Each structure stands twice: as structure tokens, then as C-alpha cells.
Amino acid sequence: MIAQYLASHPEGVIAENLSLRPSTTTAANPREAPGYWSHLEEVRKCQKFVEVTGEVGDVVLLHPLMLHSASKNNLREPRVITNPPVGLRKPFNLCREDPRDYSLVEKKTLKALGVEKFEFKPTTERRLVVPQRVLRERAMLEAERKRLEQLELENITLITNSVPIAVA
């Protein structure tokens, strides 16, 4: 499902708020963008679900495109977790000469696409993706830097204008 969506968007996509949208969209409202993808809407179309349980400390490795959730879901409502965007050193290579050279993720992606090879050509240049969390942290650090600078300036002013007092 997601592999097909990504394959049909060589311009790249932006992941935010449990959705995907083409990186080149100019729509003011992402939901109105051609090619908008809602995880919650898509998961409601799913017919097959698998529950995985484990003990504290167990690790479950999933394909990065797998719709998944963690913790108890007493209401049995679909939930999706999207991890922060990460940048790969280089794009996946889905058209290798030797099939033994594919990574596990590449193999699973090809299987999801229903092909042995997939010639993928990005149509836009690679851009740095900066997660919203990082932008918030940068803004907080900048505000703190300015606050400290202001305190330092006020301290210099106080010292410069200080009046000596006599001590017995």
C-alpha cells in the first residue's frame, strides 16, 4: 500500500500529522493536495490485521513502511505511529545488478511492489528534512541565548552605574 504510493510520487513526500503529501504541492490545505494520503483513512480500508504481543524488553522489527501501533488498544480503534523523518545517506537502490545485494528493506519493498526490480528516478533534488521537534528545540535555544545576552547587558549596565558604598 505505502510502497505503491511512494513509487507513484518520485517528487518525494512530506510526512506530517499521520499523513503524506507530495513535496511539490502548493495547496494551502494539505488535505486538498492532489496525492494527499491519510494513514487513518487508509488503515480503515485494511482487511487483514495481525496482533503482535510481547514482554517488556522484547523488540519487534517491522518494515519501515508497515502501518503499526504499540500498547494496548482496548477500544480496538486503528492507530498509526509515524516516526520522525530521517534522511538516508543515499536512496534505496531497487534496481541492482545482483539480487543478493539488496537490503532486507529493499527486498520487502520490491515484494510489496510485486516486481523483481524497480527503476526509480527522483524528479526533484534531495532536500534536508528537519523534524518539527528539532525546529522547536532550535527556537527554544535561540530564545535562551537572547535571554542570556540581555541579562549580560543588564549586568554590565548595573556594574557601570553602580555607586560605591562605605564599609566599616
Image (cartoon, rainbow, N blue to C red):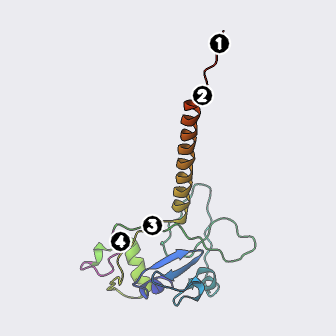
CB under 8 Å between callouts 4 and 2?
no
> Can you identify the residue that label 3 sits on?
86
Task: Where is residue 85? Give x, y as percent.
Answer: 48, 68
Helix, strand or loop for disc 4: loop
Residue 167 falls in image quadrant: top right
Residue 72, horizontal then vertical, whole percent:
70, 66
- Characterize the local packing of mark 3: few (<14), some (14-19) or many (20 or more) Cα atoms within 10 angstroms: few
Q: Three-letter amino acid code at disc 3?
A: Val
User: On the rendered structure, is 54 left or right of 138?
Assistant: right
Residue position for label 1: 167
Helix, strand or loop: magenta stretch: loop
Q: Are marks 3 and 2 in contact (CB under 8 Å)?
A: no
Q: Which mark is residue 103?
A: 4
The location of residue 52, given as percent across then percent down, is 60, 69
Q: Which residue is mark 2?
A: 162
- Name the mark nearer the viewer: 3 or 1: 1
Q: Amino acid at mark 4?
A: Ser
